Amino acid sequence: MFLRPTITAFFFLLMALSATRFSLAEDTKPANTPGGKIEVLLIDGQNNHDWKRCSPVMMTTLEATGRFEIEQATVSKSQVADFSPDFTKYDVVLSNYNGASWPEKTKAAFVKYIQNGGSLVVVHAADNSFPKWKEFNEMIGLGGWGDRNEKDGPYVYWKDGKIVRDDSKGRGGSHGSHWEYKVIVREKDHPITRGLPTEFLQAKEELYDRLRGPGKNMTILATAFAKGGSERHEPVLMTISYGKGRIFHTVMGHSHTSMKGVAFQETLIRGTEWAATGKVTFPSVTAAELPVDRAVSRDPKDIKPAH
Ligand code: ZN
């Protein structure tokens, strides 16, 4: 009679303790704590590129590091009207999406998420999307196609050691034929590029040129010379700040094959970690692993975990 309530209370205490343990499980640790995982929302489902084969390469690349946990939101054209994820659940949004416009409510929630310190990574043709969405174009800095032209902002490229903003008229977005292009690091003291070789080759693919956009609050980390295209040193890796948010934009990643390029993979890992946390803890590659005389590719499963 006397013991019973005590045993019941003890049972509830045990329940409460075990619930606490579950809420401290490793995958809920914030991204900035040791061993904490970066929660990524990968958005795909529409693209003029082969997103079905590209997204898995990106997912394996990030997951192989042991640093990221990815949720995939595949949004077909018929599903887009109902697309309204809770962006605030994620450390970073990774866009492999080039498709129909999102509902106004979702766009507003996304802008608020980035403004309040959210993060975005834009890969290749994801910078073709949403040509009429002003805030998105400010986030990505530069974009192409979708009738982009001088009304959307200047051409931005590298010439004689500095950035040129060129207001001349013309279409935004084009590319020459596919080749192994040389990436030249222009900003050597950024967490994403620090420790990388100064010059390296990306696997054979097209190189975007003549992108245009507002290009505000944008840092060009690396360029590549658009041989047979604009014949200019075009931005390849960029960071943009928008409100309190951090954005990493890579024009690399045309196909699932070129996404196996070590240049694409290393910069995606480093750029995604930086966007999510402001730091890069992933060890940088050596000039032997990322050479300038040949383009190296690898199965993303062979990427070694960071810790
Ligand atoms: Zn492409």
Image: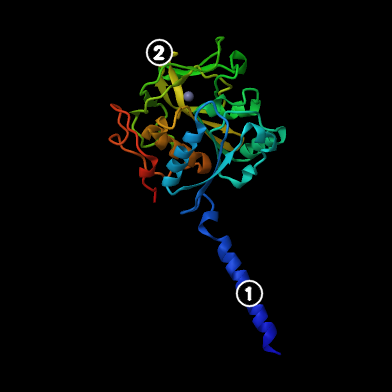
Residue to which mark 2 is pinned:
228
For mark 1, give the secondary structure. helix
Picture mark count: 2
Q: Where is residue 283 in the image (x, y as percent from the top left)?
A: 37, 43
- Image quarter of residue 97: top right
Mark 1 or 2, closer to the camera: 2
Amino acid of disc 1: Leu
Q: Which residue is drawn at 45% across and 26% down?
A: 236
How much space separates mark 1 and mark 2, taking CA atoms?
Answer: 71 Å
Label whose residue precedes the other's in the sequence (1 or 2): 1
Residue to which mark 1 is pinned:
13
- Image quarter of residue 197: top left
Q: Residue at x 71, y 32 (%)?
A: 104
Disc 2 crowd rating (10 Å Cα; few below 14, some 14-19, many 20+) is few
Q: Position of residue 169 (x, y in %)?
A: 57, 9
Q: Residue at x 34, y 29 (%)?
A: 198
Amino acid of disc 2: Gly
Residue 289 horizontal side relative to residue 111, left or right: left
260 or 127: nearer the eye?
260
- Image quarter of residue 158: top left
46 or 213: nearer the eye?
46
For mark 2, give the secondary structure. loop
Is residue 68 visible to us here?
A: yes
Q: Where is residue 251 in the image (x, y as percent from the top left)?
A: 47, 27
Is residue 249 visible to us here?
A: no
